[in-house]
Amino acid sequence: MATTRGVLYVHTVPSALCPHVEWAAGGILGVPVKLDWTPQPAAQGQYRAELSWQAEAGTAAKLASALRGWQKLRFEVTEEPSNGVEGERYSFTPALGVFHATTGVHGDIMVPEERLKAAMLKAASGEADLTEEVERLLGRPWDDELESFRYAGDGAPVRWLHQVV
């Protein structure tokens, strides 16, 4: 199995859920996780943390699956491409749910041909606006909602964890 690196960005979480996030991440990574929680300036009473990790490819999907059930949480998980495996990005907000994208070696979102064709068909039939469909495929609604929480995290501490593979 290929090894890769990634980052879990917890943008907002109430204090009561902080230990549950650590427990879930530790269960996926196979090592105890203790995050450095800092107040989230963009959301009063919420906390934020970042976790850089190294583990087998597919770990980002496992982390996103473990965390997506908590509606009071906003997070992103990225995974770098590795030998024979594309990179991934997951974003979650309570209002929008989960966004998933495949990413290339430079971090660009790669939209599969069939998804682009489907967006074009929806637009051609008058069912949707093409620009809005493409922005959705690129994760724009998630980026718009998460942007203020990302800036609030500038300068926050980051901790590296390595899974035994």
Image (cartoon, rainbow, N blue to C red):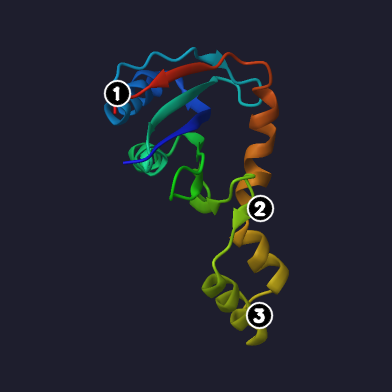
Circles 1 and 3, Cβ within 8 Å, touching? The answer is: no
Picture coordinates of residue 157 (x, y %)?
58, 13
Q: Amino acid at mark 1?
A: Val
Say if 73 sits above or below 35 in the image. Answer: below
Q: Which residue is mark 1?
A: 164
Q: Which element type, helix, strand or loop, lies under badge 1?
A: loop
Q: Which is more foreground, mark 1 or mark 3?
A: 1
Alpha carbons under labels 2 and 1: distance apart: 35 Å
Q: Which is more foreground, mark 2 or mark 1?
A: 1
**Residue in view at x 68 percent, y 66 percent:** 132
Picture coordinates of residue 146 (x, y %)?
63, 39
Q: Amino acid at mark 3?
A: Ala
Tell me which label, 2 or 3, sits earlier in the chain. Answer: 3
Picture coordinates of residue 158 (x, y %)?
55, 17
Which disc is residue 140 wearing? 2
**Residue in view at x 68 percent, y 46 percent:** 144
Tell me which label, 1 or 3, sits earlier in the chain. Answer: 3
Q: Which residue is mark 3?
A: 123
Alpha carbons under labels 2 and 3: distance apart: 18 Å
Q: Residues within 10 Å of mark 2 (few under 14, many from 20)?
A: some
Tell me which label, 2 or 1, sits earlier in the chain. Answer: 2
Q: Nearer the viewer, residue 45 or 145?
A: 145
Determine whether, in the image, residue 81 is placed left or right of residue 20.
Answer: right
Which image quarter is the C terminus in? top left
Picture coordinates of residue 47 (x, y %)?
53, 20
Q: Residues within 10 Å of mark 3 (few under 14, many from 20)?
A: some
Q: Which element type, helix, strand or loop, lies under badge 3?
A: helix
